[in-house]
Amino acid sequence: MENTKEQTGIKTIALLILPGVQLLDVAGPCDVFMSANFFTPVGSAPKYRVQLISSTPDRMVYSNAGIPLTCSHSIYDHDCSIDTLLIAGTDLNLLDEVNPDIYRYLQGIATNVRRIGSVCVGAFVLAKAGLLAGKQVTTHWKYAAILQRTYPDLNVNVNPFFIHDQGIYTSGGVSSGIDLALALLEEDCGKPLASEVAKHLVLHLKRPGWQSQFGDAITDYDLLAPFTKAIRDLLKDKLGQAISIDYMAESVNMSVRNFSRVFLKESGMTPGKFLEKMRLDQAKKMVEYTDMSFEMIAQKCGFGNVISLRRLFLKYLSISPLQYRKACKGAE
């Protein structure tokens, strides 16, 4: 592999495209880097070139929309110089179909590129390649718990839109790849150019808030383990009531100790934490979709009082229920 910085000074940004990729995972970062060239002074060399890399020799990959993407390179090419490599995400259910050669490719190239990162579910690919061990990372809020459970040596943080840890960059769901690309652009060229590109694309240079504000605290129902689903079904209509771990254990004919052990193994969290997150998800929906008072929401979700409701919003979302309602309604 050649030196990652070409003599011309043009940095090559490569996106590794997985089958079933979401188009915005690719198009978002591409538009950020190519827009930077638009603001390059006349007579100066462009700052970036963008390459798409496929996992197949024919260099053709189909997106989740069925649109074919023709890549300029494949993982079997050895003559391309890369400054920054980003792995674009795909559907989590398609990861088992990923070409095993991708992992060998990533392991081989990791020490020869200046930066390597992921968009959305691409973090799972970096993790399987062994490149995220011991690092703080993020991914799509919907799959963060699965990433943590699958790779317990990672420190998965669902809050940030992107994370940089020891030369590895991971970003959250879908559009978070744009947040990451803008940060990489600012790192390379400074804030003034990054701000110009953000304004050109009608974006915030640094988006306010957290990724976790967009998602549920509990993983999608279909992704839960059967035992966890059973407990969720048991509790979903009782969240306004006092619920004890004894009650949960008794409902499935188990001792409290055995129930707590099995539940932690199946869900990756304690029963108490699971109940807390269920109540938070219900409260978020009520705050977002109703005009119900916060006092009533706190009562219906089993928080007891508004102070407890506010405390939980701040704990998980870093904003108050009032700020969340304003953000959802587009109010200042």
Image (cartoon, helix red, strand yellow):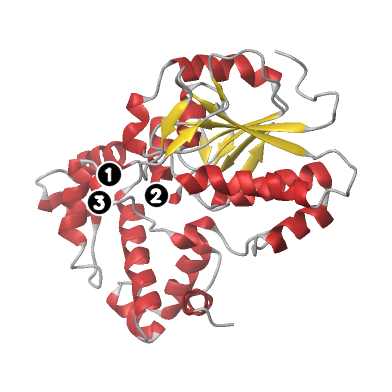
> Could you tell me residue 74's position as x and y percent?
53, 21
Task: From the viewer's perspective, tell me whether residue 328 is left or right of residue 222.
Answer: right
At x 40%, y 41%, the residue is: 67
What distance separates the C-alpha of mark 2 from that of mark 3?
11 Å
Dot 1 falls on a residue whose secondary structure is: helix
At x 57%, y 16%, the residue is: 107
User: Would you say the residues marked 3 and 1 are in contact, meaning their CB atoms lie under 8 Å apart?
Assistant: yes
Task: From the viewer's perspective, tell me whether residue 269 is left or right of residue 256.
Answer: right
What distance separates the C-alpha of mark 3 from that of mark 1?
5 Å
Q: Which mark is residue 221?
A: 3
Q: Nearer the viewer, residue 285 or 256?
A: 285
| Lower position in the chain sequence, tag 2 or tag 3 | 2
Badge 1: residue crowd in 10 Å (few <14, some 14–19, many ≥20): few
Badge 3: residue crowd in 10 Å (few <14, some 14–19, many ≥20): few
User: Would you say the residues marked 1 and 2 are in contact, meaning their CB atoms lie under 8 Å apart?
Assistant: yes
The amino acid pointed to by label 2 is: Lys
Q: Which residue is mark 2?
A: 142
The amino acid pointed to by label 1 is: Leu
Q: Is residue 229 above or below residue 92?
A: below
Q: Nearer the viewer, residue 66 or 81?
A: 66
> Could you tell me residue 112's position as x and y percent?
70, 18
Q: Is residue 254 above or below residue 131?
A: below
> Could you tell me residue 261's position as x and y percent?
27, 38
Quadrant showing the C terminus: bottom right
The amino acid pointed to by label 3 is: Tyr
Give the residue furthest to the right: 43
What distance separates the C-alpha of mark 1 from that of mark 2?
9 Å
> Could you tell me residue 88's position as x and y percent?
51, 37
Q: Which residue is mark 1?
A: 223
